[in-house]
Image (cartoon, rainbow, N blue to C red):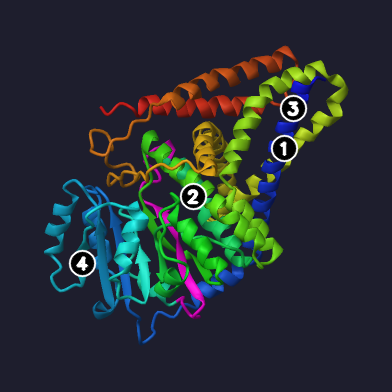
Amino acid sequence: MNILEASVIAVYGLCLAFIFCYSMAQLHLTILYWRHKKQRTQQAQSINQEQQVWPKVTVQLPLYNERYVTERLIEAITAFDYPRQQLQIQILDDSTDDTTAIIEEKLKQYPDLNIQLIRREKREGFKAGALQFGLQTATGEFIAIFDADFLPGSDFLKRTVSKFTDAGIGVVQTRWGHLNQHYSLLTKLQAFGLNAHFTVEQGGRYSGGHFINFNGTAGVWRKACIIDAGGWQADTLTEDLDLSYRAQLKGWHFVFMEDVEAPAELPAAMGALKSQQFRWTKGAAETARKHLGRVLQSEVPLPTKLHATFHLLNSMVFICVLLTAVLSVPMLFIKDNNPQLAILFRFGSVLLLSLVALVAFYWTALYQQSYQAWKTTKRFIPDFFLFLCMSMGLSLHNSMAVAEGLLGIKTPFIRTPKYNLLQKRGTWRKQAYFMQSISPVTVVEGILTLYFAAGVVLAFRFNDFGLLPFHVMLVIGFGAVFFYSLLHNRRT
């Protein structure tokens, strides 16, 4: 075995080790979720919605060119069942198109409500800048935030505000729902992944007393918490995760309400999905760069430090998946040239243990929708398989985002366009806010599809089928991402 082969094996092994550790962390969250399920249900049922005195609440709606969803958002917010004298609504509008005119016309229908249309001279700091600007004139003790595509229920404020039972609670975060989950295969798979985050992941961290995060929308902040933590800052693309960690490192507690759902629109086009994934993964890496050292040096318990580490570094999984995938093909040659290392290569089966942990994690999330084991399993098998394939297919795109975040390379905040898509109705084609989905990365994704197809062929040449399922999934994943990128680059 030469130095090059040894280096390939070392990098391959380190990536597998990180994926394994990450999967074990997700498995632990699954255990915490099940262990405290009954307790969370009892807490949800004990919410006091009949309290006599309701505090002042400011609802902030950060908007930027949202012509298709602005009216329905305003209708949902103005329908809140909350004392009008205690409610302030701030529309933080940075739009450069006709969205502002649509808002002004819509607000004529609500002359008796305290609604402020706030516009800045410059869009500095993007969403974080808009939220911080609005905070200066916010009169509420609590700040509820909704992105443009969300449609919270009329009882949202009463159910969430009533959870601030302790002065140390800084945030109440609710679960995202989906307005267009069944619109396409892309939206279905996105919902599959997000549902796991908004049940097992957030619920497990909350149950275990570990750090969770405000998800940028569909949550309520205590204004004093925002101020104490240093306010909204725009030095990362995930201002929500950044402020969440600053607040929790200062001792504020967060509450997660799985039983309260706020539905929103999922990206239906590959260009929009890639843009959103880029922002989320790069922002997470930027936040890790900013806060991981502080977390490790803090006085929080060791289990919380470990979960916070994997929380902040979760986007690193994409780099590990990509490196493992690319190196898996030369690994076939190395295994064939070095039969004396067969015992060492068997340690690669650790990937199967990682898979078992992820199966438990995602199966648990899907089970919460029906509470029927057999029905869940029938749905789970194809959905989980395609979800893993698509996640692998996005690993190159997301790895580049993570690398930029860790290296401190700055890029602007690019919003995800919304088109008022409800289930299978509506279209994003021929609409404004179209996002190109073809780039040099797309070409490489197509090349990698052929590369992993060669890995499938090599399995039969070497009579080594251990990596065959992995290579088949990579072909499907990269092929699907490449295909959708080409397909969705056409508007007609």
Q: Position of residue 407 (x, y in %)?
A: 53, 41
Please report contact status of discs 3 and 1: CB closer than 8 Å, yes or no.
Answer: no
Please report contact status of discs 2 and 1: CB closer than 8 Å, yes or no.
Answer: no
Please report contact status of discs 2 and 4: CB closer than 8 Å, yes or no.
Answer: no
- Regarding mark 4 in the picture, which secondary structure is present there? strand
For disc 3, the marked residue is 7
Instruction: Name the amino acid, label 1.
Output: Leu
Magenta-drawn segment: 163-186
Q: Kindly report the distance in space between the C-alpha atoms of the residues bearing marks 3 and 4.
A: 60 Å
Task: Name which of mark 2 and mark 4 comes first in the sequence.
Answer: 4
2 vs 4, front mark: 4
- Regarding mark 2 in the picture, which secondary structure is present there? helix
Q: Residues within 10 Å of mark 4 (few under 14, many from 20)?
A: some
- Regarding mark 1 in the picture, which secondary structure is present there? helix
Left or right: 491, with 14 as reference point: left
Task: Name which of mark 2 and mark 3 comes first in the sequence.
Answer: 3
Q: Residue at x 36, y 53 (%)?
A: 264
For disc 2, the marked residue is 194
Q: Residues within 10 Å of mark 1 (few under 14, many from 20)?
A: some
Left or right: 295, with 50 as reference point: right
Task: Name which of mark 3 and mark 1 comes first in the sequence.
Answer: 3
2 vs 1, front mark: 1
Instruction: Name the amino acid, label 4.
Output: Gln
Q: Residue at x 20, y 72 (%)?
A: 114
2 vs 3, front mark: 3
Q: Kindly report the distance in space between the C-alpha atoms of the residues bearing marks 4 and 1.
A: 53 Å
Task: Give the vertical position of 406 relative to 438 (above or below).
Answer: below
- Regarding mark 3 in the picture, which secondary structure is present there? helix
Task: Give the vertical position of 262 relative to 465 (above or below).
Answer: below
